[in-house]
Amino acid sequence: MKSMMAVPFVASVPFAASGNSHLISNVNSVSKKYGHKFKISLNVYSFNSLLREGKIDLFDVLDFCAEYNFEAIDPTGYYFPGYPEVPTDKYINEFKRKAFLLGLDISGTGIRNDFTNPDSSSRKADIEMIKEWIVATEKLGIPYIRVFAGRNNHEGYSRDQVFEWMAKDFKACCEFGEKHGVMIGLQNHNEFLKTADDVDRIFDMVDSEWFGLNLDVGSYRQKDPYAEIEQNIKHAVTWQIKENVWIDGKETPTDVVKLFQIIKKAGYRGYLPIETLGPGDPYKKVPVLLDKVMNALKVVES
């Protein structure tokens, strides 16, 4: 399937980044006022193995997105040349130009940090890396950057202590992001943050309108994932729509219609990046998931 249903879209995140924050109070208030609008993007992690092995590059994935009429691309930072160093301005400009000429938005990017590490110097280095990538994200014209809580076992420190220093670290990132018009998008990744309650707790502690959730549907594995999604959707500024969710400890195909009904009911406005994982050829797997997503959208929008 190479044609996509046209779904009108007005993005809340770029609007907030434009300096009109006096018109909004939080992500959820924007959504509820105007109703839902969806825009389909591709998370480039779907091509992780081919990109890591150097068999393709980000420009090849742009071509793929254009071929299948995605509306946007989400190129994770790992795949830019020289990561964890930021890409050169020349590379950024070439990537932006090709995306524009292909009719593609650049909906997000992401880096890997670990704010569960008890070593404050390591966390400080991660904050500095995030700041450098915020500047690169701004240059790319991207509305948000994806970050993580982390996966250190924080031996000798309680979860309460980790939450405290993690909240301070995220606040520092949000303050810098605000200066550059870039939101900080925390991905719940079944690491330190495992449940919707964990996500709510860190959002309450950070308490910044520049802090949003990159809602990963495949990373709720303790309880009913659809109930967890409903609980956290108020924080969502973008997504990772995956092939599978976890129910009763088992990986189960995502009920995309049910998921999109939840997202529609919440009045979410923004990108819905899809992502495939695991073995198999992404050139075959991604179109299958895209077809499933577009068929679900037709049902939900009917």
Image: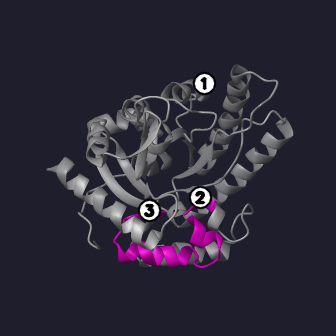
Q: Residue at x 26, y 71 (%)?
A: 3
Where is 26 relative to 81, above or below? above
Q: CA distance from mark 3 to mark 1?
A: 31 Å
Q: Position of residue 201 (x, y in %)?
A: 56, 24
Asked whether residue 256 is in view, the answer is yes
Residue 127 location in percent, x, y? 74, 45
Q: Which residue is mark 1?
A: 205
Of 140 and 52, the residue lying toward us: 52
Dot placed on the residue nearer the N-terminal end, 2 or 1: 2
Pointer 2: what residue?
138
- The answer to whether 52 is drawn above or below residue 137 in the figure is below
Does label 3 or label 1 sit earlier along the sequence?
Answer: 3
**x and y percentages locating residue 6 in the rendered image:** 24, 63
The residue carrying pointer 1 sits among few (fewer than 14), some (14 to 19) or many (20 or more) residues within 10 Å by Cα, namely some
Q: Which residue is mark 3?
A: 42
**Left or right of 55, for residue 292:** left
Query: SS class of the residue under badge 3?
Result: strand
Residue 34 on image: x %, y %:
27, 41
Instruction: Identify the residue at horizontal 34%, vertical 56% (top origin).
Output: 39
Q: Is residue 60 magenta?
A: yes
Of residues 288 and 23, the one nearer the viewer is 288
* Mark 2: amino acid: Glu
Q: Is residue 230 magenta?
A: no
Badge 2 marks a residue whose secondary structure is helix
Q: Mark 2 and mark 3 in contact (Cβ < 8 Å)?
A: no
Mark 1: secondary structure = helix
User: Which quadrant does the N terminus fall into?
Assistant: bottom left
What kind of residue is marked 3? Leu
Which span is picked out in magenta?
A: 48-77
Q: Which of the marked residues, 3 or 2, is nearer the chain's N terminus?
A: 3
